[in-house]
Image (cartoon, rainbow, N blue to C red):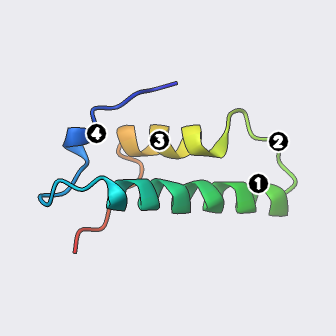
Amino acid sequence: MIIPDMEKYIGNDGSAFGLVVAIAKRSRDILEKANENKVKLPDKPINIAIEELCNNKIQLARR
């Protein structure tokens, strides 16, 4: 499992809440799509979402 440096992804306010919510939402999306397509995931959805964030496949929306 990848353990990223959270400081890189946390906003200016210093709160990890937005990061956690974004990863949780992406994780649910991954699981939902896998279930719809009846695909077995190679890893837990949360791990896939974290890897996507670390590899810049997804970006957090800043408000």
Q: Which residue is mark 4?
A: 6
Give percent across and percent down for residue 20: 42, 54
Question: Is label 1 in a helix, a strand or a loop?
Answer: helix
Mark 2 to mark 3 CA distance (whole Å): 18 Å
**Quarter-wise, where is residue 29 in the image?**
bottom right
Q: Earlier in the sequence, mark 2 or mark 3?
A: 2
> Which amino acid is tagged 2?
Lys
Q: Earlier in the sequence, mark 2 or mark 1?
A: 1
Mark 2 to mark 1 CA distance (whole Å): 7 Å
Q: Nearer the viewer, residue 17 or 34?
A: 17
Give percent across and percent down for residue 4: 34, 31
- Residue extending furthest right? 38
Q: Is residue 59 above or below residue 62?
A: above
Q: Earlier in the sequence, mark 1 or mark 3?
A: 1
Residues at discs 1 and 4 in contact (Cβ within 8 Å): no
Q: Earlier in the sequence, mark 1 or mark 4?
A: 4
Q: Which mark is residue 40?
A: 2
Q: Which residue is mark 1?
A: 34
Q: Which residue is mark 3?
A: 50
> Which amino acid is tagged 3?
Ile
Residues at discs 4 and 2 in contact (Cβ within 8 Å): no
Task: Say whether residue 26 is left or right of residue 35.
Answer: left
Mark 1 to mark 3 CA distance (whole Å): 17 Å
> Which amino acid is tagged 4?
Met
Question: Is label 2 in a helix, a strand or a loop?
Answer: loop
Q: Nearer the viewer, residue 2 or 17?
A: 17
